[in-house]
Image (spheres, rainbow, N blue to C red):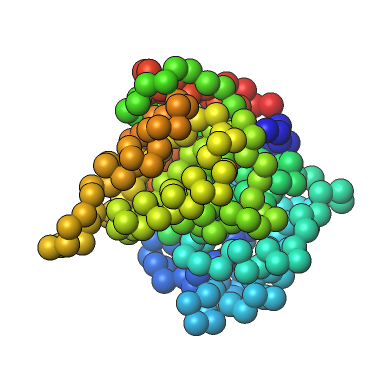
Amino acid sequence: MKSTILPEPLKPGDLLRVITPSGALREFKAFKQSVEIWRSRGYRVEVANDIQHNWGYLADKDENRRHQLAQAWEDPDCRGILCARGGFGSTRILENWTWETNSSTPKWLIGFSDITALLWSLYNAGISGVHAPVLTTLADEPDWSVERLFNWVEGRPLPPLKGCGWGGGVVTGFLLPGNLTVATHLLATPLLPNLDGVILALEDVTEAPYRIDRMLTQWRLSGALAKIKGIALGSFTRCEPPANIPSFSLEEVLRDRLADLSIPIVSDLPFGHDSPNAALPVGGLVTLDADQGILTLMSKE
């Protein structure tokens, strides 16, 4: 369990750079609408010239996407990095990657889904990012979710989130939010953070119950779940069983694989794929109340 450095609050006029570290951009209308949301708040948003490139299912070749990330991270005028979308590919650019933390002021990194790998890697470097909508999803968020994101990056406190408590008491720890599929593929790699004492926050999309079962079983067998203090579960969107095939429900799988861990668990929290996707600080100190079903951010330290 570790504390992280929180970047300085953003303010109108700050420069933000848009990158595509993962999949190729496809939702151009939603992307432009989301960029406009940031610009309407007074931010200067610089979109990379190669934003519409693709290399197969990736936004570009690894070296080009890695260069795009490096340019944004090392730019002294840039205060934040907005990820265009998820998909797949961020883990590929993290091979032989080191976050430069000496010559540049820590800046905001904002995204979710495949961006989990970047957020967790940055957490390893001691810097807090934001698990929050990317630029192909922000425009579809409800007003309160959009405001929550801006409140956090602009230095204002966040209200608690309410879900369904499974019982097990109250625990405090550093929050590590991410996508279950991406996080599972970080197991047994140098990118996996130290999980001792963290509160793990997980979500996913379009994964059948047996696949969720398989991933959570891998977490169990790896020993990783024995280290954490609590689990916060967000939305598992379109994770229904296949038609006409015998299956457990998603709820049954989650209960079967997690309920016997004897740690506080809260489910049905409003974050993940599809709306709403409430912003969560990576490495933020939080309290998880599994009796009341509440996740509360405790500190900005």
Number of numbered callouts drawn: 0
Residue at x-position 48% and y-position 18% = 170
Quadrant in the picture for the C terminus: top right
Q: Residue 168: x, y in percent?
A: 42, 20
Q: In which quarter of the image is residue 22?
A: bottom right
Q: Between residues 168 and 27, which one lies in front from this camera angle?
A: 168
Q: Between residues 132 and 124, which one lies in front from this camera angle?
A: 124
Q: Which residue lies furthest to the right in this view?
A: 103
Q: Between residues 213 and 56, which one lies in front from this camera angle?
A: 213
Report whether residue 251 is seen: yes
Q: Residue furthest bottom?
A: 56
Report whether residue 15 is seen: no
Q: Between residues 292 and 118, which one lies in front from this camera angle?
A: 292
The correct choice, above or below, for 167 with respect to 105 in the image is above
Q: Residue 86: x, y in percent?
A: 49, 61
Q: Residue 220: x, y in percent?
A: 49, 45
Residue at x-position 36% and y-position 58% = 211
Quadrant in the picture for the N terminus: top right
Residue at x-position 43% and y-position 59% = 136
Q: Residue 89: x, y in percent?
A: 56, 68
Q: In which quarter of the image is residue 298?
A: top right
Relative placement, left or right, of 295 versus 104 is left
Q: Which residue lies furthest to the front in this view?
A: 221
Residue at x-position 47% and y-position 70% = 25
